[in-house]
Amino acid sequence: MSTILVINSGSSSLKYSLIDVEHERELAGGLIERIGQESSPVAHTVRQWADEDAVPAMLDATYRSERRIADHDEAFAVMREQLVAHGPSLIEHPPVAVGHRVVHGGARFFAPTLVDADVERQIEELSVLAPLHNPANLAGIRAAKAAFGDVPHVAVFDTAFHQTLPPAAYTYAIDADLARAHRVRRYGFHGTSHQFVSEAAAAFLGRDLRSLRQLVFHLGNGASVTAIDGGRSVETSMGLTPLEGLVMGTRSGDIDPAALVHLSRRAGLSVDELDAMLNTGSGLKGLAGRSDMRDILAGREEGDEAATLAFDVYIHRLRAYAGAYIAQLGGVDVISFTAGVGENAAAVRAESMATLGFAGVEIDPARNEARERGIRRISTDASRVIVLVVPTNEELQIARQTAALL
């Protein structure tokens, strides 16, 4: 059995997954948070598989602890400790490679890439475009290479799937020389998720991916939508950074650029203050003081005006992008919802699709409200457009791409 260790390294977190790529099953996964702080929670889960097809989550075993973890090097040592203490054994399941999630690959990286010194340097250079993500991804790569120096390390970039965007979609209408000099263009993000979901939807339907026009809504704390034509990304809502596009948990999404000039002049906000406001103090949090959609939905049920407005703004933006992207595709065959909000918030799915009857979308309320696991259809049998809920699995997609490269 071949196993691949998948790493998603954040600035103060380490998420890992040990995957049997032959059977596409996660053997174990874990999350170490608040690295570098006084106390770091550790959660390690060992997956139990009754057979090759079942995923009996009730049999999974999760082990929790807490300690001080100084840096990513120490976090990798803790990960090894968890695997030794609780399994699965790295002796019995030695990773043949380590796959790393890297958020920003710019225009340079359009495929999974073996990590060497030059690739590390380029990831570091691209940190100017993703200062919150690439440095943390690079820290994870370097710590992983120190811990697993005898196997290949592969970088899989969030932006890579969107390298098929046509120039009309990725070009901003600003001074061309200035844009070129500073690499200002649309890159798009959540690429591994959009690719996984679009391929999983086609497989579920027994359809040729190349024949389908798809919209994928990745709705989590970060949110994006991608138009996919024949398996290729042709339009996506996130731009130069993950800030553009849909309303998110703490990010504004689209805003008139002149509003920022106005706030700088009239409210005296600095560039750094504007950046913090847009990324960490806006979106649902800015509108209602709460960034979690579950809290927004609860507030809406209780008649809270701020929560209701936040929900309405969120839905308004989803509908606007859906209509625009259907127009870009010339129609749509499949619409999929994924990630935390997309997979679990039936009200978001229902309301965002409610005005798309003109395009052939008809949601079945009972199917939409059903809390089933796995891929499921939520549109009626008569709906011309098939609407699905597709649980994303970015770790498996990274493992697949790492294995394919090797």
Image: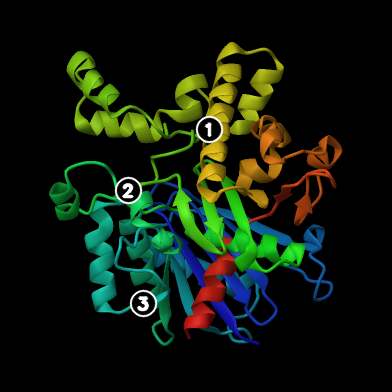
**Disc 1 residue type?**
Ala
Which of the pair 333/115 is nearer the observer? 333
Q: Dot 1 corresponds to which residue?
A: 320
In the displayed structure image, the side of residue 306 where residue 14 appears, left or right: left
Q: From the viewer's perspective, is the residue at label 2 or at label 3 nearer?
A: 2
In the displayed structure image, the side of residue 133 where residue 48 appears, left or right: right
Q: Are marks 3 and 1 in contact (CB under 8 Å)?
A: no
**Disc 2 residue type?**
Leu
Is there any visible trace of residue 102 in the rendered image?
Answer: no
Which residue occupies the extreme front position in the image?
330
Marks 3/1: CA–CA distance: 47 Å
Residue 41 position, x and y percent, is 53, 51
Marks 2/3: CA–CA distance: 32 Å
Helix, strand or loop for disc 1 = helix
Q: Quadrant of residue 93?
A: bottom right
Q: Dot 3 corresponds to which residue?
A: 146
Q: Quadrant of the N terminus?
A: bottom right
Residue at 42% x, 83% y: name it. 152
Is there any visible trace of residue 358 in the rendered image?
Answer: yes
Residue 47 position, x and y percent, is 71, 67
- Residues packed near mark 1 inside 10 Å, few (<14), some (14 to 19) or many (20 plus): few
- Residues packed near mark 2 inside 10 Å, few (<14), some (14 to 19) or many (20 plus): some
Residue at 37% x, 46% y: name it. 239
- Residues packed near mark 3 inside 10 Å, few (<14), some (14 to 19) or many (20 plus): few
Residue at 25% x, 63% y: name it. 124
Q: Dot 2 corresponds to which residue?
A: 240
Which of the pair 40/131 is nearer the observer? 131
> How are the residues colored?
rainbow
Helix, strand or loop for disc 2 = loop
Marks 2/1: CA–CA distance: 20 Å
